[in-house]
Image (spheres, helix red, strand yellow):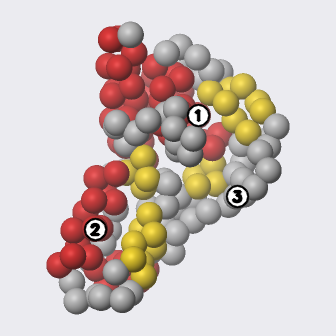
Amino acid sequence: VVLRAFNAYGPRQDPNAPYAGVIAKFCSAVAAGRGVEIYGDGDQTRDFLYAADAAEAMELAGERPVAGQVFNIGSGSATTVTEVARLLSEITANPVKAVRKEIRPGDVRHSRADISNAMDKLGFTPKTSLREGIERTLAYHQELAKKT
């Protein structure tokens, strides 16, 4: 069984890793009182998947007779990078400063998982809303920031 997880994020994701996700980077920056770096216009979209939902999909795949099949695992929704920054502003009740950067070569413009096969054959439904997942991830990074 192959599970293709789209933009998984959550607490304990290293924001400094070479391919760290945007949510980890944004939450770490906000927790440290820095602006967030947005590459390009911020209208690029991603399908963000909370780590616990990804883990549940793995568990479901191990329980079902689906050997040899491939499943997209995500939220099934596309969210802009700018929307992530806006949600962080809402959650913190403070404007998040966006530092605009040149678009990086090779960055994907739009990404959204078609999770219908995973829903049908695995019974997978993501349970964590983007807001709730960002709140949990931000809380983790805020705790880390207190320790430094």
Q: Tag 2's secondary structure?
A: helix
Mark 1 and mark 2 in contact? Answer it, CB < 8 Å.
Answer: no
Q: Position of residue 23 (x, y in %)?
A: 50, 39
Q: Please, is residue 142 above or below residue 88 in the view? A: above
Q: Tag 1's secondary structure?
A: helix
The residue mark sitting in front, 1 or 2, is 2
Q: Position of residue 103 (x, y in %)?
A: 79, 43
Q: Please, is residue 125 above or below residue 8 in the view? A: below
Residue at the extreme front = 18
Q: Is residue 145 left or right of residue 30?
A: left
Residue sitting at x 34%, y 37%:
11
Q: Earlier in the sequence, mark 1 or mark 3?
A: 1
Q: Is residue 90 visible?
A: no
Q: Which residue is mark 2?
A: 58
Q: Amino acid at mark 2?
A: Met
Q: Is residue 2 left or right of residue 97?
A: left
Q: Which residue is mark 1?
A: 85
Q: CA distance from mark 1 to mark 3?
A: 18 Å
The residue mark sitting in front, 1 or 3, is 3
Mark 2 and mark 3 in contact? Answer it, CB < 8 Å.
Answer: no
Quadrant of the frame with the C terminus? top left
Q: CA distance from mark 1 to mark 2?
A: 29 Å
Residue sitting at x 37%, y 42%:
10
Q: Viewer-proximal residue, 81 or 1?
A: 1
Q: Viewer-proximal residue, 59 or 122?
A: 59
Q: Amino acid at mark 3?
A: Val
Q: Position of residue 14 (x, y in %)?
A: 44, 35
